[in-house]
Image: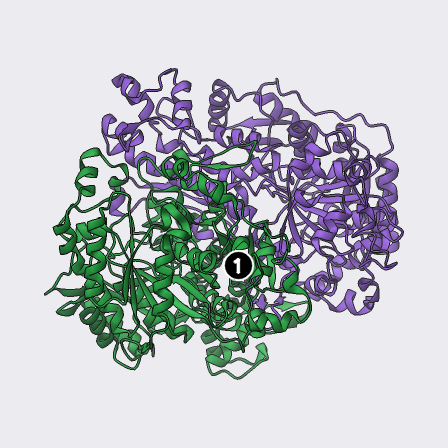
Chain colours: A green, B purple
Amino acid sequence: MCLCDCRGCAEIYWEGGEERQNQKHPFRICCCFVLCCRPPKLREISWLLFVFFSSDIEISRAQSPKAVDVLAKEIGLLTDEIEIYGQTKAKVRLSLLERLKDQPDGKYVLVAGITPTPLGEGKSTVTIGLVQALTAHLDINSFACLRQPSQGPTFGVKGGAAGGGYAQVIPMEEFNLHLTGDIHAITAANNLLAAAIDARILHENTQSDKALYNRLVPVVNGVRGFSAIQLARLRRLGINKSDPGTLTEEEVSKFARLDIDPSTITWQRVVDTNDRFLRKITVGQANTEKGFIRQAQFDIAVASEIMAILALTTSLQDMKERLGKMVVANDKKGEPVTAEDLGVTGALAVLMKDAIKPTLMQTLEGTPVFVHAGPFANIAHGNSSVLADKIALKLVGETGFVVTEAGFGADIGMEKFFNIKCRASGLVPSVVVLVATVRALKMHGGGPNVRFYLMYLTISINFYLNAQNLQLVADGCCNLQKQIQIAQLFGVPVVVALNVFKTDSVAEVDLVCKIAKQSGAFDAVPCNHWSAGGRGAVKLAQAVEKAARQKNSFKYLYSLELPIVEKIRIIAQKVYGAEDIELSLAAQTQIDRYTRQGFGNLPICMAKTHLSLSHQPERKGVPTGFILPISDVRASIGAGFIYPLVGTMSTMPGLPTRPCFYDIDLDPITEQVKGLF
Amino acid sequence: MCLCDCRGCAEIYWEGGEERQNQKHPFRICCCFVLCCRPPKLREISWLLFVFFSSDIEISRAQSPKAVDVLAKEIGLLTDEIEIYGQTKAKVRLSLLERLKDQPDGKYVLVAGITPTPLGEGKSTVTIGLVQALTAHLDINSFACLRQPSQGPTFGVKGGAAGGGYAQVIPMEEFNLHLTGDIHAITAANNLLAAAIDARILHENTQSDKALYNRLVPVVNGVRGFSAIQLARLRRLGINKSDPGTLTEEEVSKFARLDIDPSTITWQRVVDTNDRFLRKITVGQANTEKGFIRQAQFDIAVASEIMAILALTTSLQDMKERLGKMVVANDKKGEPVTAEDLGVTGALAVLMKDAIKPTLMQTLEGTPVFVHAGPFANIAHGNSSVLADKIALKLVGETGFVVTEAGFGADIGMEKFFNIKCRASGLVPSVVVLVATVRALKMHGGGPNVRFYLMYLTISINFYLNAQNLQLVADGCCNLQKQIQIAQLFGVPVVVALNVFKTDSVAEVDLVCKIAKQSGAFDAVPCNHWSAGGRGAVKLAQAVEKAARQKNSFKYLYSLELPIVEKIRIIAQKVYGAEDIELSLAAQTQIDRYTRQGFGNLPICMAKTHLSLSHQPERKGVPTGFILPISDVRASIGAGFIYPLVGTMSTMPGLPTRPCFYDIDLDPITEQVKGLF
């Protein structure tokens, strides 16, 4: 892999004083650095052949990734700081943060987008193309931090999420499938809690206080005692006793009964599968459940609050506390019932003990990538993990760059990145890269509304979309301008990255860049990373590097101390451009309840469509004069945010008539995966 | 790890001609072999301290496992034949079977048990104790092949399944939790298929033939074609066309409509959680599913047919074929509908591509262990994987031993091991180790029926069970005798392993061994592996080694050519001792259907209680004169067996009032798991 044969990447860097060297400059520097990080194989590939005839997975497979332990050494990880999973994936231990705590952070770059079409505008490919350009072409340490995709859509409509073309994380099948099992761990933890809730309701409803207490605190080999988590509950109840025999009848009842009101259960079961028939179900219909049936639902695994917690947590201790604080329902007095009350905190932490470690992978050009957490971008905050960003910022060193991505458009993903994720991490972003496409701008300018069926383009629509139309583009730039202004509300410089398609005309590209700069962007550059890899994003990398040197005046949009309603109104007016908000009765009731329960000081996580700045997906461009309706308000107390629902949010995708899986296959001889995209 | 400091285990063995040496004798032999495989740490532990005061997890943690890559080298694996998962687990590639195909197999030992109490009689600890004795104490190559436990019971009632005391697989928390994700992969594959069934029914019922066909075979970028799996379906339908435009209306309808009869769906969703409220549910109640609701259920993940396939498959190609053959329902004409018909075979294989590789771990004394597959022992065959056994038999070499375990009592687990697993693998077992306990024998002799609540023993019952009672023991040995006779039906020598508890009297132990030998056992020996590790199972190891040298006349109990009913009757009469069988109408109808559908030549997998030789759990000892009622008959066509239901089988455990998770916790500083047992 290392052309000059100095084996620098594997050895030289490791001679003597390793630790000190790491702290100065974790990334390995040797005479063949660029080559090390850009294995020559790709260069031998005929562009023509690939750009026109090959699929993402074929490109991914044409490149042989370096062994992950070699990559780990290149970026300055010690042997006992990684846990290898096969040849191309490794989990990184959190102990690293302690070792590098005195190391200054690198520059922190967020990739966001304009209001997208349902096909997406290529934020992930820009993120990957940018780090490929920085490290493999400009010789600047960089790290990409990405979300782990849900497996559901991989077999449904969307396909994979490893980037595309020559800007990909490899091996893309590993990235898109089980990875290192984090989502499976979340599913297991989420569903253990769900099972505990219903089982507890059943047992409480079929036993006397005494029977319940005797089972909860049994005599084991002649001895009777409370478990640690039961003692903690006693203390919360103000019962300062540790001998089970000494509780009064009233105390026994208080301790043994959670008294959950089934109608208030907000905790749902999850699967990592697009299973539309689980959107609304009735559970408990077997005789063994004695008639305690109720209506429930399954969400897709990544919609679990535990995923949001994984993305926002800062340590094992913090994660355990957040897991315990999760509110799953109210009791009959209207008080919150938590995972801790159900005695399951420790078990959840045990199930999540490995998932908390970020997974190290690499791009097609050998740049390091962390894949960690992937919460929903509507009912959750849609950003990858705080821990991965923190570790990467230490590893790249003061002059290096960490590039991370926010889901949906900047009005949602970026706003949540600043107000929720940065608040949780305390990190200060240096630059926002705003991704736009001519296709989407044409839509905002009044062009046809691109839908999924356009993945199967017919000649005519294709022609309409691809024909040069400067007026449509110019009109559509209003959305780009608005998103730039939103970023500026937070005091962070913006670089616009125009993700160029081969059908875009030079005039269209120039026009977008011109308008972007007039609209206040620090710079605006066309990118060809999809067809040319890092080489196609060098201009972007240079612009980002320059922007990062700007004076930074980052600030949050609102203070946590404000009432919930005020915080919602600020986001609606300043970010979405709404005239005002309108609360349903349900929403108002919930806000009052959360405020009374002491959750009023949490940040806001708006659950709104990403297809428009407003709540109406069909309103493109920059809608004005609308009142944002808040139909309901929910809370993820463990994750630490209140989420108002703007309209109804589907938390379970479905399978279409012809799902992706029709094309997915495994060659039993070569063991190669086919048909993933 | 290697006391003599020759580092032999890591290096010497690898000097030159590695491959040839491997083929001759995969296991490493060096001057300190025994010490290598029995790290000294354990010897430094004070017995008293541990036997009386410590939990399984404390013992497990007190031992430091050797790095799995070192273990892999010791047993002769090449670097590119393993995929490391952290420090203590590795997946082994199937390519090994090709490399070692000319290597003769070692001896194949099955550990089975008498009719157990609900607490189990220690088959797993005997399995582990036996290999510890063979390798660490008698210097004979050996391998234990175990089932991966379901995570559900780990947090429910049962706790872990890594063995116990000084006969454990370590680290036990890794063994008992996610391991290398095989069960998660099975869950994902199982549920993708389930989602595909309901979604397909919905789409077929809401679209015309033409619309359905146009969506199934869309125009992509102006081109229209069938995917490979669609072409295969066309061929099955006798339509030899490849141009979508040329199908007649009738052919279009035949191709596009699976016409699934919802009332015949046998494919259920799964979770790896004890979630009793999912035993019977109604799905499809959201408006988006347009009223196509139906009753369904979730099973625990290990009950999935895909788990049974993983346990019986012999290669990637074979697994893919089995996955495609799985029958999920009948169409309205009564013909079987398969996963292949739904177009999902390739996707299932992709999801299972890593799960097919056995996971390498080690015992407390450093002996190698394969953990792979763990199908239910009632609705499935309850044995670990064929692939793990095959690989292990090559690795131990001609003079070595592979010890594997069958679930439940010998009447169920062993019978299925011989008639189903050995048929699938073609392997010939050398010895059966039959595990018994004085506690269980007393129960069979008329003592109290041990139940789960006895895990919380009160003094009195404790006293009753533990007091010497030679008459009870002598009477109870009838069950031991019967199980010995069952093993002899298959022509395999039996060694009885009496799993000794500290409360058993010498007289009781001697009596059991005496009766066992009189009953035809090749030998019968007391074992103390729980308290003394391998050292406590040396006598057993010697007996097994001697028995394996006996002439072997292994034969199956029935021919596959016999009618289904005949095969069921043979098992009921010869194995269970029933007078005859009695088929319900439903059972008879199913048998006729399966026979008509061409599935009549599959082996039989009885789904019967393990708590009695009969169908009535309360009938201990050796029940006679009973008619075995077959309430229903089902089939796992992909796994390759018909399973008659004797009474109702629960495929979803529940959580008790006080689940294990109350004691399970994670120390956020040391990252150590507490409370697993």
Whole-percent x, y for residue A196 in the image: 47, 60
Q: Is residue B119 left or right of residue A525?
A: right
Q: Measuring 69% from the left and 69% from the top, which residue is drawn there?
A: A16
Compared to residue A419, the image places residue B203 above or below, namely: above
Whole-percent x, y for residue B489 in the image: 75, 28
**Quadrant the N terminus of chain B occupies:** bottom right
Q: Chain of mark 1?
A: B
**Quadrant the C terminus of chain B occupies:** bottom right
Kindly identify the amino acid type of the residue bearing the numbered disc 1.
Pro
Q: Which quarter of the picture shows residue B27?
A: top right
Compared to residue B28, the image places residue A640 above or below, namely: below
Whole-percent x, y for residue A18 in the image: 65, 69
Q: Secondary structure at mark 1?
A: loop
Q: Nearer the viewer, residue A13 or B533?
A: A13
Q: Nearer the viewer, residue B456 or B162?
A: B162
Compared to residue A628, the image places residue A451 above or below, namely: above
**Residue of label 1:** B656
On the question of residue B452 being in view, the answer is no
Q: Is residue B106 left or right of residue A82?
A: right
